[in-house]
Amino acid sequence: MQNTVSKVAVVGSGISGAICAATLARNGISVTLFDSARGPGGRMSQRREISQDGKELLFDHGAPYFTVTNPDVLSVVAEWESRGLVAEWKLNFWSFDCFSNEFFNTENQERQSKKYVGVPGMNSICRALCLEPGVESKFNVGIGNFDWIELENLWSLTGSDGQNLGQFKGVVASDKNIISPRFTEITGRSPPLALSLAPEWVELHNIPVNPCFALMLAFTDPLSSVPAKAFSFTNSKVLSWAYCENSKPGRSCTRFLFIA
């Protein structure tokens, strides 16, 4: 039976949770990663849809790209790039003015740092990290409760369905919803982690959560009337920006994503 001293639970398979799990595993820690979603990604998730003619449509409906400024992180991204998990998104970003209905080239302002995307989808990075040796990933498993066993110095995790998920020497939570009132608003249940176990986390309640709506559109033919593949909106009360999925490396089919 595995020693609980070397067992750590990571909750959330977004980029922070996935990197944490992989790093711990590389250092000899046995990691069990839990996520209530069907697969990894978090804010870097990819949506899969089937069109009426049976074609598979993939949308990066979370973060569309990321940039890097820290040298240490840049070395990590270079390693991902060598593995084919990411590629630079070399694209000229524009702006669309809703008052004048005109496009403007904003390359000088926008291309200050390289933009990277996951290949073939943004969730490719998290997916690869969750498959690292030493990481056991469990999806469709929500956490219902964290219990601290004082006499054994262990955390006991219970699933949202009441299932016993095991005992762990350490727990890493990459999602503030485990202690946020928003969890109660959505599920009607108390947050999984009681504030009595970590009273200093009460400040997390003050971190705002702003919803973001994404409109995913697919077209059979290229949109010749739209000169830009990625652009922000000015003078719009609803839209923030839009981009064409097939302008990214490793993508095909004309798909546009509009972000509110």
Image: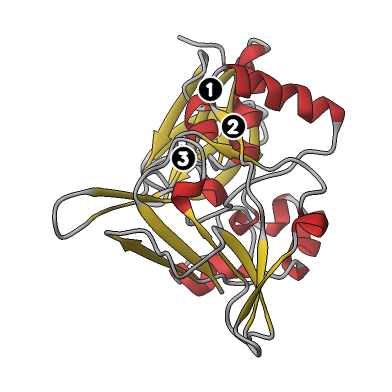
Q: CA distance from mark 2 to mark 3?
A: 10 Å
Q: Amino acid at mark 2?
A: Ala
| Tag nearer the camera, 2 or 3 | 2
Query: Disc number at residue 237?
Result: none
Residue depicted at x 81% and y 56%: 108
Above or below 26: residue 23: below
Residue named by callout 3: 121
Measure how far apart labels 3 and 1 are at the Cα level: 11 Å
Comparing 172 with 210, the one in front is 210
**Residue in view at x 74 percent, y 40 percent:** 114
Q: Quadrant of the C terminus?
A: bottom right
Taking 83 as reference, is 95 left or right? Answer: right
Residue matched to label 2 = 87
Residue furthest left in the image: 53
Circles 1 and 2 in contact, beta carbons < 8 Å: yes
Q: Earlier in the sequence, mark 2 or mark 3?
A: 2
Give the image location of residue 245, x and y in percent: 46, 52
Marks 2 & 3, CB-CB < 8 Å contact: no
Picture quarter with the N terminus? top left
Secondary structure at numbered mark 3:
loop
Q: Please, is residue 67 above or below residue 83 in the view?
A: below
Residue marked by disc 1: 84
Residue displayed at 50% across by 48% down: 247
Whole-number angstrom distance, CA of label 1 to CA of label 2: 7 Å
State the SS at label 1.
Answer: loop
Q: Position of residue 90 (x, y in %)?
A: 64, 42
